[in-house]
Amino acid sequence: MTVTITFWGARGTIATPGPQTTRYGGNTACVELTDGSGNLVILDAGTGIRSLGKALLTRNGTGGVQADILLSHAHWDHIQGLPYFAPLFMKGNVLKVWGPRQGEVAMETILRQMMHPAVFPVPLDALAATLEVEHVTERDPIITPGFRVTAMRVRHPAVTMGYRLERPGGPAIVYVTDDELGRGGEYDVPQDWRKRFEAFCGGADLLIHDATYTPEEYPSHVGWGHSTWLEAIELAHEAGVKRLALFHHDPEHADGPMDEIVQQAQEAAARWKGLEVFAAQEGQTLTL
Ligand SMILES: [Zn+2]
Ligand SMILES: [Zn+2]
């Protein structure tokens, strides 16, 4: 069975709307996955989720939206769109939000504070939709109506999860935004993390991975929790991935610099047959 993937936001760190980003887009992380039966998983709730919300209401009617929303972590650019996700405000919609506990702080507490009356007019408890917030761990797979999802902690400040989504007879999709593949940074992950991470990404039909920096930019951002496009390509090759989507574009990378990155990345990947590389563009849809 096929899976359709739509990028509603591919920008990292902060939304960057404007004439310089019309092609790659200015909205922050949000990716939609649907299987042939209409089962829906949403990866992250950056500002891109606002447009997805409107599309879902058109597609399913005001009270017919059911979705699992998987949050990688709770940094602004991955949750900021959630209060503006229209299906939350309509009766009949059923939404389940998954995310890692942040040390002592529950994900629900973070979302509740994000909608505190001091900073947002409608509190979490006043939402009309049915909303549940659940924690994700590396141990227990998440079973959604359409996908079996496993999580792995990645190298980023705060507790940040990568997700691998599969379904019987269908493609494997791995989503890892915000991950430092370079040697910098100190993260609470095991010694053999890299080996385990390659296995986690292994053979994926599509890997969506952090490619915030160019190799030239990385030395001044060591320990910030992000990767270069070249590191993402090397990972994809080592893990036997078929297609790599460069993701979490730096706010300073307007359309022109992004075109250059894509060209360099495709030249670098050309020495490995069978690996296709592109940079995720807002509004782009692919079917696997
Ligand atoms: Zn981010
Ligand atoms: Zn982050």
Image (cartoon, rainbow, N blue to C red):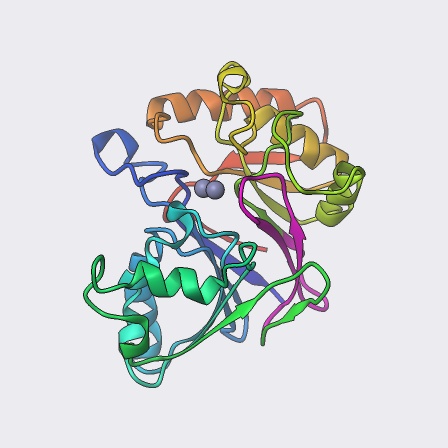
Magenta stretch encompasses residue 217: no
Q: Which residues are magenta?
A: 146-173
Magenta stretch encompasses residue 161: yes
The residue located at (38%, 51%) in the rendering is 46
Whether residue 10 sits left or right of residue 194 in the image: it is left
Spot occupied by residue 202 in the image (x, y as percentages of width and height)? 75, 46
**Residue nearest the observer in this picture, 286 or 246:** 246
Q: Is residue 134 above or below residue 16?
A: below
Whether residue 242 sits left or right of residue 223 in the image: it is right
Whether residue 208 sits left or right of residue 183 in the image: it is left
Q: Is residue 217 above or below residue 51?
A: above
| Quadrant where the image shows the C terminus | bottom right
User: Which quadrant would residue 104 be assigned to in this image?
Assistant: bottom right
Spot occupied by residue 163 in the image (x, y as percentages of width and height)? 61, 54
User: Which quadrant would residue 131 be assigned to in this image?
Assistant: bottom left
The residue located at (69%, 67%) in the rendering is 141
Q: Is residue 71 above or below residue 246?
A: below
User: Which quadrant would residue 139 be assigned to in this image?
Assistant: bottom right
Spot occupied by residue 60 in the image (x, y as percentages of width and height)? 35, 77
| Quadrant where the image shows the N terminus | bottom right
The residue located at (34%, 72%) in the rendering is 59
**Residue nearest the observer in this picture, 155 or 207:** 155
